[in-house]
Image (cartoon, rainbow, N blue to C red):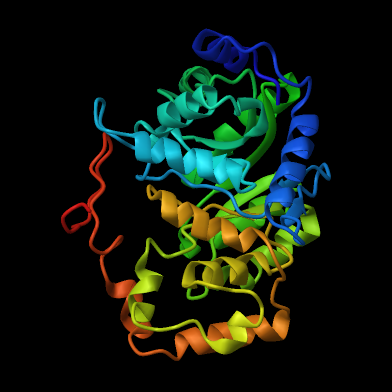
Amino acid sequence: MTSGLATKRRTFLTGVAAVAATSMFASAFSMRQAAAQQPGHAPIMRPIPKSGEMIPAIGLGTFETFDLQPGEPRDHVREVVRLFHEHGGRVIDTSPLYGMSEVCVGDFIADLGIGEDIFITNKTWTTGEYLSDNSHSEGQLRQSRQRLWRDRIDVLQVHSLENHDQVRHWLAQKKAEGSVRYIGITQWSPEYYDTMERLVNTGTLDFVQIAYTILTRAAEQRLLDACAANGVAVQVNIPFEKARLFGPVAEQSIPDFAKEMGIETWAQYFLKWIISHPAVTNVIPATSQPQHVVDNMGALYGDLPDRAARERMADYYTGLTGVADALKQPPYPGKKYGGVVTWPFPQAQRT
């Protein structure tokens, strides 16, 4: 969307005049560019059910990977954003809870001159000092708009259902006012999927963000069907189970049947399995490595497995040695993310 704040900052940084009048035009133009970079293939796009607006099925997450201490080198993360956009990516997910991630996203997209081409999904994490206190929500939204250089946030969701009864009503007000385009809820734990299903069935949500992977399939029980029935977009987080899916396949080649579908890497294997579910709108793998974002974006092109192929993919992976213990490993094996926000689980030395 056109953002006055983004335009002002880009003008300050680069001296470039105002960009295209609407984000839909800018996005359409950029998607044609992306398709041209992949001869014979168009990017896999999905409609947002409530509006029909099309977004790419592969996005970019920023949890931990974009949370860098002030003064710490961050050119590699800027390169992640540049390559993501260059390969057809448009949807970037972030949150005020992710430390410096909003700051990095806002700085990078403004500096690269791609702000109006990026679709931001964001979150709000507030409780207030008393019942019906919206001041914390208002302050957080104001801060997010400033950090991201946005007049409006494309998607704003209740982070992990925190105080959702109050915040959902406030979000509805913000949507009606026009400062937020779409509203929703997020949660990574299947323990809360019954609650999410109930809220989806109210018909008031545009988006949900959930965990859904080749090993974590609880959403298939009812939640994904409820989203499809109520026209709610599904954004999938933690698609690699915080990198733990890769452990059992470290020495394994991609099976031939997957190669025949154009899948070249295990990252693409896991991502294409997710986005081939008809209820899934978008998936947001996070990375701080430029080579990994290029790999991930390869899943945005080519064919998708059908239902039978999805089951074959799942059966093959779950039958591999070590998969049963994969989720018992610490998150992000071999890495440590030490930004402004720290998390209460042990991690190895950062690499």
Which residue of the protein is positioned furthest toward the left in this rendering?
Answer: 349
Q: Which of the two residues, 173 or 101, is positioned nearer the viewer here?
A: 101
For the N terminus, give its image quadrant.
Answer: top right
Q: Position of residue 50 (x, y in %)?
A: 80, 44
Please state if 66 lies on the left or on the right of 266 as rendered: left
Residue 313 quadrant: bottom right
- Residue ID at (48%, 52%): 293
Please state if 223 lies on the left or on the right of 29 as rendered: left
For the image, the number of numbered tags is 0
- Residue ID at (24%, 25%): 71
Q: Position of residue 351 (x, y in %)?
A: 22, 53
Q: Is residue 348 above or below residue 171?
A: below
Q: Is residue 41 above or below residue 320?
A: above
Q: Is residue 214 visible?
A: yes
Q: Position of residue 329 (x, y in %)?
A: 27, 71
Q: Which of the two residues, 191 or 231, is positioned nearer the viewer here?
A: 231
Q: Which of the two residues, 167 or 320, is positioned nearer the viewer here?
A: 320
Please state if 176 lies on the left or on the right of 150 as rendered: right
- Residue ID at (55%, 83%): 314
Residue 321 quadrant: bottom left
Q: Position of residue 297 (x, y in %)?
A: 57, 56
Q: Is residue 204 visible?
A: no
